[in-house]
Amino acid sequence: LCIYVNKVCFHSYVIYITANNICFHGRCDYYCDTGHAICGHPDTLEGSFAVYLPIKSLAPRKVWRHPWRRSYHKRRKAEWEKNDDYCNVVRKKPPYNDGRRLVDIMDMAVLDFIIGNMDRHHYETFKIFGNNSFPLHLDHGRGFGKAHHDELSILAPIYQCCIIRQSTLKRLLELHLGPLRLSDIVRKSLSTDPVYPVLTEAHLVALDRRLGICLSTIRQCLQEKRPDEVLIYNDD
């Protein structure tokens, strides 16, 4: 079954009925099976819909495997989970051995941790910019899942590499110290949304808590290394 918008199929699903509930699971290479289904009660559930813009025919994109992707295997761990020096392996490989890409991955890790997205197995860039392209922040379908759980492994790129943009750290500190905290800004932004409140209060509280954890992780790096080794001022 495809979900169509303007005659374009955005995804493919299998729908079935179990325990008098209507359920579906996606068609993909990972957890797309009946053991990881999404079910209604009996036929109603919350969801989201995403559209990628611009279309690929206008702005072709390149898909990259994320170096800190998860193994998606019950028993086999990813290399970064077994090797504390994994970042040194990544630093030697293009496009992470030169330019902005490695610190872009750090920024993406901050976003993913704050929203609780564990599913960053791939990312995309615009082909027109080559290896100088910034990663596109797409596909956050697993974000804002468990408001009371902070998945620290999402920050592995940061605590293994111990680098961060100075501009990113500055913004995190501004949001942490106020006067307006991250939760305040997001709450105000969502207040005009047609489906307000969008996020529960527990998720808003989690934003501030996780931002503080990001800062603690960076602080630990600054205690172990010199500031000029951790803070990136110019990565062009």
Image: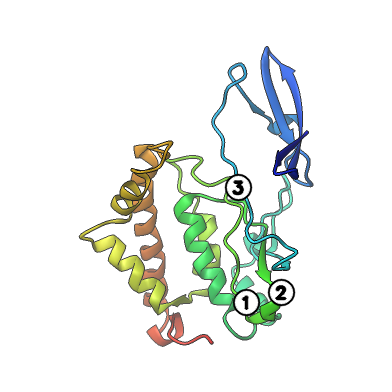
Which residue is rendered at x = 24% and y = 57% of the image?
180
Q: Which residue is mark 2?
A: 127
Q: Pinpoint residue 56: horizontal percent, then vertical percent.
A: 73, 62
Q: Are marks 2 and 3 in contact (CB under 8 Å)?
A: no
Residues at marks 3 and 1, CA–CA distance in whole angstroms: 22 Å
Q: Are marks 1 and 2 in contact (CB under 8 Å)?
A: yes
The amino acid beneath tag 1 is Ser
Q: State which tag comes first along the sequence, 2 or 3.
A: 3
The amino acid beneath tag 2 is Lys
> Quick one: quadrant of the C terminus?
bottom right
Q: Are marks 3 and 1 in contact (CB under 8 Å)?
A: no
Q: Which residue is mark 1?
A: 133
Number of numbered discs present? 3
- Report the coloring of the rendering: rainbow
The amino acid beneath tag 3 is Ala
Q: Which mark is residue 39?
A: none
Residue 4 vs residue 179, the one in the foreground: 4
The answer to whether 41 appears left or right of 126 in the picture is left
Which residue is rendered at x = 67% and y = 65% of the image?
124
Secondary structure at badge 1 equals loop
Which residue is rendered at x = 39% and y = 37% of the image?
196
Q: Which residue is mark 3?
A: 50
Residues at marks 1 and 2, CA–CA distance in whole angstroms: 8 Å
> Quick one: quadrant of the N terminus?
top right
Q: Pinpoint residue 57: horizontal percent, then vertical percent.
A: 75, 64
> Which picture quadrant has residue 129?
bottom right
Secondary structure at badge 2 equals helix
Secondary structure at badge 3 equals loop
Q: State which tag comes first along the sequence, 3 or 1.
A: 3
> Which picture quadrant has residue 87?
bottom right
